[in-house]
C-alpha cells in the first residue's frame, strides 16, 4: 500500500455538506462521493466521509462475475502493519456500488440482455473524514500538495445556496411510471399465484418511476433527501463521464447495513482474513429485496419485472484491505442520460392485495421522488434569482447612462 499523507484540522469553520459542495465544484469532470449517517431522533453519526479527485476507476461489466473481479482488485491492496486513520483507509479502498442484478450471477438466474454493467468503483481519492465528536477533520491524500490543496479548496468553493424546506408529499412534474398501477397489480397477482402454488414463500417485485433532469443539480436531490429521510446510511456518488462509461450520479438513504467487515491488526474479534467480497456475496441473496427461497424468488421476479433493477436492492459503500462498510440500497435515486430514476418494491405473499401493493410502491418511493421535486424547485428559484439580479443590474446601468447623458 502506497504511503499517504494525512493532516488533521479543526472543523469549526465548515460543514461537511458545504465542504463537499466546494470540492465537487473545484474538480469538474472528476469523480467524488459523500457518506453521512443520521438516526431517526435527529442525531448525526460520528463520522462523515467525503472524497474527490479519484485517480482510478473500474467498471464491472455484465456477463462476467463481478465478485471475482472485486476479489482480484482486493487482493492487490496490501494492508498496513498498523491500523491507519479512517481517511487513509477509505482513500485506498474501492468506493462505489454493486447493482442488485449481480445476484443473478450468484443464483444462476438468466441476466437481463440490456445490462451494460453490474457495478462501478473508484479509488485513490483525496478523502476528508469529519469527526463530529472531536470537531476535527482529517484529510488523506497521495501527497502533501494534494492534502494542502484540499484543505484550501473545501473552504473556498462557490456559494452554496440555501435549499427551501422540501415538501414530503410533492412529486415531480412529468413523472413517468415504467409500469402502470394496473399492470403492476397484475404482476402482483401472478406472483401471489406462484406463492400459493408453493414455488416460493415470498417474492419481492419492484417497479420504477422516472422524471427528467430539467437542469436540476443532483446534489440538491441529496440535500433534500437527507432532510426527508434521515437514515443510518446517506450516500452520494458522482461518477464522471469516461471513455468506458457515461456520467452517473446516485443519491440515496438506507436504514440497512449489508456488510461491515474489519480486517488486520486491531480488528477485534473479526478474523484477519475475513473477505469483504465474500461477505457481500453471502449477504445479497439474504437481503430484504430478494424474497425466499432466494433462487426461486429471484427467478420469479426476473420473469415478472420490466427490466434491470440496477441500484435498487444492491450495495453501496467502500471495501479495502482494512475492511468494508456497504449499505443495502433501498430508497435510491439514479441519474443517467438526463433522467432521474427511482425504484421501489413490494413483498408478495399469500395475503397480498394487488392494488394495495401497487399503492405501497408509490408510497415507498415518495421520499426520493419528493427530493427530485425539491431539486427542480431549487433550480427554478436560482433561475428567478439570477433573472432578478440581471434585471437590477440592467436597470442600474440604464440609470447610470441616463445620468451621464443628462450631465
Image (tube, grey):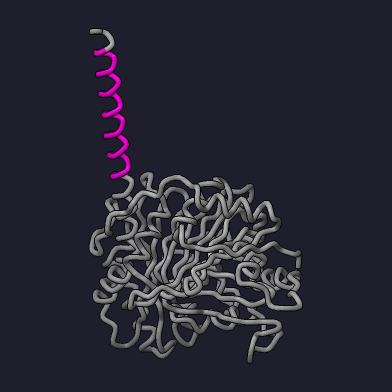
Secondary structure that dominates the magenta span: helix
Q: Residue at x 44, y 83 (%)?
A: 291
Residue 108 in view, yes or no: yes
Query: Residue 236: image x %, image y %?
Result: 47, 61
Q: Residue at x 32, y 71 (%)?
A: 364
Is residue 385 within the magenta segment? yes
Quadrant for the N terminus, please: bottom right
Picture quarter containing residue 215? top left
Per the rendered image, the range of residues in magenta is 381-403
Query: Residue 195: image x %, image y %?
Result: 38, 86
Quadrant for the C terminus, please: top left
Is residue 43 within the magenta segment? no
Judge by depth and name the residue closer to the eye, 339 or 402.
402
Classify 105 as above or below 266: above
Q: Residue at x 29, y 83 (%)?
A: 352
Judge by depth and name the residue closer to the eye, 125 or 9.
9
Amino acid at each position: 500500500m502506497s504511503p499517504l499523507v494525512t493532516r488533521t484540522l479543526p472543523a469549526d469553520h465548515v460543514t461537511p455538506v458545504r465542504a463537499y459542495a466546494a470540492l465537487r465544484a473545484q474538480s469538474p469532470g472528476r469523480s467524488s462521493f459523500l457518506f453521512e449517517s443520521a438516526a431517526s431522533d435527529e442525531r448525526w453519526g460520528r463520522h462523515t466521509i467525503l472524497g474527490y479527485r479519484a485517480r482510478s476507476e473500474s467498471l464491472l461489466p455484465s456477463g462476467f462475475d463481478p465478485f471475482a473481479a472485486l476479489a482480484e482488485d482486493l487482493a492487490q491492496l496490501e494492508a498496513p502493519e498498523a491500523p491507519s486513520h479512517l481517511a487513509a483507509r477509505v482513500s485506498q479502498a474501492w468506493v462505489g456500488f454493486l447493482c442488485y442484478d449481480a445476484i443473478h450471477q450468484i443464483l444462476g438466474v438468466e441476466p437481463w440482455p440490456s445490462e451494460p454493467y453490474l457495478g462501478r468503483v473508484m479509488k485513490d481519492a483525496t478523502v476528508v473524514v469529519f469527526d463530529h465528536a472531536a470537531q476535527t477533520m482529517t484529510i488523506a491524500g497521495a501527497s502533501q500538495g494534494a492534502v494542502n490543496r484540499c484543505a484550501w479548496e473545501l473552504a473556498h468553493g462557490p456559494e452554496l445556496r440555501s435549499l427551501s424546506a422540501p415538501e414530503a408529499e410533492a412529486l415531480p412534474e412529468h413523472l413517468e411510471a415504467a409500469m402502470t398501477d394496473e399492470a403492476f397489480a397484475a404482476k402482483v397477482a401472478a406472483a401471489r399465484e406462484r406463492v400459493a402454488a408453493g414455488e416460493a414463500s415470498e417474492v419481492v417485485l419492484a417497479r420504477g418511476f422516472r422524471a427528467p433532469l430539467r437542469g436540476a443539480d443532483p446534489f440538491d436531490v441529496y440535500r433534500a433527501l437527507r432532510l426527508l429521510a434521515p437514515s443510518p446510511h446517506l450516500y452520494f456518488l458522482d461518477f464522471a463521464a469516461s471513455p468506458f462509461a457515461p456520467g452517473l450520479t446516485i443519491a440515496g438513504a438506507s436504514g440497512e447495513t449489508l456488510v461491515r467487515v474489519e480486517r488486520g491488526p486491531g480488528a477485534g474479534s473479526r478474523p484477519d482474513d475475513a473477505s469483504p467480497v465474500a461477505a457481500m456475496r453471502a449477504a445479497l441473496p439474504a437481503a430484504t429485496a430478494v424474497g425466499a427461497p432466494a433462487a426461486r424468488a429471484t427467478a420469479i421476479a426476473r420473469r415478472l419485472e420490466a427490466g434491470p433493477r440496477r441500484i435498487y436492492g444492491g450495495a453501496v459503500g467502500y471495501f479495502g484491505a482494512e475492511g468494508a462498510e456497504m449499505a443495502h440500497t433501498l430508497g435510491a435515486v439514479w441519474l443517467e442520460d438526463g433522467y432521474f430514476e427511482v425504484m421501489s418494491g413490494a413483498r408478495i405473499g399469500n395475503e397480498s392485495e394487488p392494488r394495495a401493493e401497487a399503492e405501497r410502491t408509490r408510497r415507498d418511493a415518495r421520499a426520493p421522488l419528493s427530493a427530485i421535486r425539491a431539486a427542480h424547485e431549487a433550480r427554478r428559484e436560482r433561475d428567478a434569482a439570477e433573472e432578478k439580479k440581471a434585471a437590477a443590474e440592467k436597470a442600474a446601468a440604464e440609470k447610470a447612462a441616463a445620468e451621464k447623458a443628462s450631465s
